């Protein structure tokens, strides 16, 4: 049986920069999108509001420390995806079931 000859003389591989897509991992894309949304939906906060947010996160950390595992999370009452703001009035501590 005779082997077929294949001429690949005109075939050129593209440059890596032409086919590379940064952050193509789904979780990385999700986190990048969430971070951008968070920044876009964070109003200008005064020092008191920043302190309130810090206090909420510190309370979460304290409760998790007491529980001995990650049991509490900071959640947006109105989700960022639905137009909620990253503001102390829109944050709450929730406990996992």
Image (cartoon, rainbow, N blue to C red):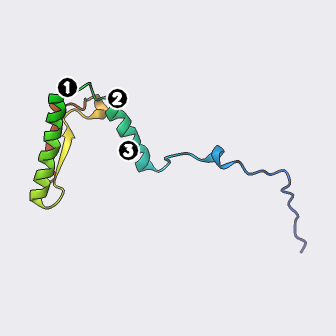
Quarter assignment of residue 47: top left
Q: Foreground residue, 56 or 46? A: 46
- Residue at position x 11%, y 51% from top? 62
Spatial separation of the CA atoms under disc 2 and disc 1: 17 Å
Q: Quadrant of the N terminus?
A: bottom right
Q: Residue furthest bottom?
A: 1
> How would you rate the neighbour count of disc 1 (Cα within 10 Å): few for under 14, some for 14-19, many for 20 or more?
few
Residues at circles 2 and 1 in contact by the CB criterion of under 8 Å: no
Spatial separation of the CA atoms under disc 1 and disc 3: 26 Å
Q: Foreground residue, 86 or 81? A: 86
Spatial separation of the CA atoms under disc 3 and disc 2: 14 Å
- Residue at position x 19%, y 47% from top? 73
Q: Earlier in the sequence, mark 1 or mark 3?
A: 3
- Residue at position x 27%, y 25% from top? 43
SS for callout 2: helix
> How would you rate the neighbour count of disc 3 (Cα within 10 Å): few for under 14, some for 14-19, many for 20 or more?
few
Asked if residue 43 is positioned above or below residue 68 in the image, the reply reads: above
Q: Quadrant of the C terminus?
A: bottom left
Q: Which residue is label 2 attached to?
A: 40
Where residue 12 appears, as percent x and y from the top left, is 78, 50
Q: Is 1 on the left-hand or right-hand side of 38?
A: right
Asked if residue 81 is positioned above or below residue 64 in the image, the reply reads: above
Which of the two discs, 2 and 1, sits closer to the camera?
1
Asked if residue 1 is positioned above or below residue 44 in the image, the reply reads: below
> How would you rate the neighbour count of disc 2 (Cα within 10 Å): few for under 14, some for 14-19, many for 20 or more?
few
Q: Which residue is label 1 attached to?
A: 46
Residues at circles 1 and 3 in contact by the CB criterion of under 8 Å: no
Quarter assignment of residue 89: top left
Q: Which residue is label 3 attached to?
A: 31
Which of the two discs, 1 and 3, sits closer to the camera?
1
Q: Is 21 on the left-hand or right-hand side of 5?
A: left
């Amino acid at each position: 049986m005779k082997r077929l000859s294949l001429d690949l003389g005109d075939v050129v591989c593209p440059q890596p920069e032409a086919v590379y897509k940064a952050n193509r991992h789904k979780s990385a894309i999700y986190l990048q999108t969430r971070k951008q949304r968070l920044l876009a939906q964070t109003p200008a906060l005064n020092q008191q509001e920043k302190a309130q947010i810090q206090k909420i996160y510190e309370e979460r950390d304290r409760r998790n420390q007491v529980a001995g595992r990650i049991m509490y999370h900071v959640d947006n009452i109105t989700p960022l995806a639905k137009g909620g703001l990253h503001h102390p009035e829109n944050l709450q501590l929730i406990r996992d079931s």
